[in-house]
């Protein structure tokens, strides 16, 4: 993969699949971390990995401590409550670890008050240890099977993540190779949300009234060549009226 992206300037980095449970991990880490396009690894409960079990293995901890010393990024995915607790235990052992909580918005908020409070407390502790929260591939099906473009469906989760991590520790990812129509739909929801957050911050810090965000969906603004509705090849549409900043 590194050889593939080397000749494509649009690709500025790559998160790889090195397994810290393998005895050859540090050998490969030494080889790859010197490549400026190799930015880190993803490990959790994906690709048949199991972080919850792995943190009990001293060899895994030793390898992750070596990884932390490189300054590369570790992405924990996909989110589960036990995975968040496992990341806490991992960072007990590898305190210098630079890490991201991947696809964090995909984990539904607990409905039981104590469980929600415990989850919030764990995320705050992870934030205080340097965690970044990644929001990606936001849109999800509505009850009727269509793609849910109603901002109200996403606001509680976005508010929850924003309140904990704030503007300096939230990153957005398109979820590529997610189909382009879903990427545009996610932008149509997230961009107005964060434009409003930015406007409120500017207003509170300066006392001045900022210019209002431009009307229309971010999907259209992201593609200056498009006019009217934005239509993907499979017929999925995001119209300029689909999501307005005022929805938040």
Image (cartoon, helix red, strand yellow):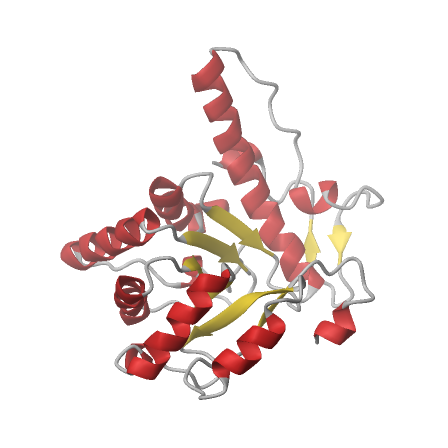
For residue 62, side relative to residue 245 (left or right): left
The answer to which quarter of the image holds residue 232 is bottom right
Q: Position of residue 153 (x, y in %)?
A: 43, 51
Q: Is residue 243 above or below residue 72?
A: above
Residue at the spot 45% in from the left edge and 17% down from the top edge: 205
Task: Give 165 or 58, whichever is nearer the viewer.
Answer: 58
Q: Nearer the viewer, residue 200 or 85?
A: 85
Q: Residue at x 61, y 76 (%)?
A: 31
Residue that sits furthest to the left in the current view = 114
Instruction: Left or right? Give the position of 78 relative to 123.
Output: right
Can residue 142 be seen at all in this image of the molecule?
no
Q: Is residue 168 above or below residue 246?
A: below
Res. 92 image quadrant: bottom left
Is residue 125 visible in the rendered image? The answer is yes
- Residue 26 is left or right of residue 242, and the answer is left
Q: Position of residue 106 (x, y in %)?
A: 43, 62
Q: Quadrant of the N terminus?
A: bottom right
- Measured as percent of width and height from the top left, residue 131 is found at 39, 53
């Amino acid at each position: 993969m590194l050889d593939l992206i080397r000749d494509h300037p649009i690709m500025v980095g790559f998160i790889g699949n090195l397994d810290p449970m393998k005895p050859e991990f540090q050998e490969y880490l030494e080889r790859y971390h010197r490549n400026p396009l190799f930015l880190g690894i993803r490990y959790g409960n994906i690709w048949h990995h199991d972080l919850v079990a792995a943190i009990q293995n001293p060899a895994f901890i030793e390898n992750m401590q070596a990884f932390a010393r490189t300054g590369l990024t570790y992405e924990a995915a996909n989110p589960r409550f036990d995975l968040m607790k496992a990341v806490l235990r991992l960072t007990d052992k590898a305190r210098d670890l630079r890490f991201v909580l991947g696809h964090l918005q995909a984990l539904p908020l607990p409905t039981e008050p104590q469980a929600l409070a415990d989850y919030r407390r764990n995320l705050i502790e992870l934030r205080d240890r340097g965690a970044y929260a990644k929001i990606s591939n936001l849109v999800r099906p509505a009850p009727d099977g269509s793609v849910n473009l109603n901002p109200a469906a996403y606001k509680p989760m976005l508010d929850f993540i924003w309140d904990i991590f704030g503007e300096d520790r939230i990153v957005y990812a398109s979820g590529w190779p997610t189909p382009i129509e879903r990427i545009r739909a996610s932008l149509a929801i997230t961009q107005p949300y964060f434009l409003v957050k930015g406007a409120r911050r500017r207003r509170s810090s300066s006392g001045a009234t900022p210019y209002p965000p431009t009307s229309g969906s971010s999907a259209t603004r992201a593609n200056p060549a498009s006019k009217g509705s934005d239509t993907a090849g499979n017929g999925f549409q995001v119209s300029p009226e689909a999501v307005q900043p005022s929805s938040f």
